[in-house]
Image (spheres, rainbow, N blue to C red):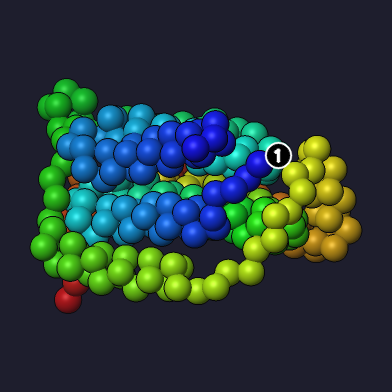
Amino acid sequence: MTLYDIIFYLFALITIGSAMLVVTTKNIVHAAFALLLTFFGVAGIYVLLAADFLAIVQIMVYVGGILVLIIFGVMLTNKITSVEIKTGTLNVLTASIVIGVFMGLVVSIMVWTGWYSMPAPIPATTAYGLGETLISDYALIFELLAMLLLIALVGAASIARREKESL
Amino acid sequence: MNNIPIEYYLILSALMFAVGITGVLIRRNAIVVFMSIELMLNSANLSLVTFSSYLGNSIGQIFVFFVMTVAAAEAAVGLAIIIAIFRNKLNVNIDEINIFKW
């Protein structure tokens, strides 16, 4: 058992444990903070997989952007005065049967498939290659994603805006 | 150096996905359902990065980049919708938002 293995199991434990906490905890704010831990765990596993640039992007986009957005959502959609920040669950039995069948299928496929994998050499950094591919082969998709983000921004502002009384 | 089998990463990703589906199915609050969707997107990203790393091909990481962009757009629009619903109905429990039900 090398140090690499220990780090992998540690990050896997953090990721799965805090993901379970997100789903099971009653308090929504606690769920949001557990999601923070999950994102950090996934970023750590990206580093183990030699995807250093994606690990940084994961922390910047998910922790810095999406999680802050979600916490804003939590704060804006709960009546803080009436302490209605807890929520319940429903359909637990049906859901667990569906999840059990699904997990059995997926895990058996993943275990029994003979994956082709060669021990890839770990590059010094992935940012250079990724950037070059992104602006040469995938330039059109890159630009389309920029358009998508702009449209989503305008759409979100338009949906969340308070309607004028006179209109 | 990296002697962990590829299956371990894939099973970790499948477990994360299952936890995400569980959250979507059993939770009542729309925000928590949202967090579970982010979990599922993250697990898909994880398996993409795994294959990219084990095949020595960086195209998978490009796709992770695209998925992250779409996830950010989805989070912004989805939370805007949730806030608009909250303004009208004063709660975000998905079993009580049934105005489309005939």
Disc tally is 1
Q: Could you say where residue B23 lies in the image, as x and y percent from the top left?
A: 27, 52
Whether A78 is drawn above or below B25: the answer is above
Instruction: Give residue A150's position: percent from left, percent from top.
Output: 65, 50
Residue B66 can be seen in this image: no
| x 48%, y 34%: residue | A6
Left/right of residue A78 with respect to residue A154 in the rendered view: left
Q: Nearer the viewer, residue A33 or A150?
A: A33
> What is the crowding at mark 1: few (fewer than 14 residues within 10 Å), some, or many (at least 20)?
some
What's the residue type where badge 1 is placed?
A: Phe
- In this view, A7 is above or below B89: above
Residue at which label 1 appears: A53
Farthest residue, direction front = A1
* Quarter of the rendering containing residue A92: bottom left
Residue at 39% x, 35% y: name it.
A14
Residue A163 percent coordinates (x, y): 40, 45
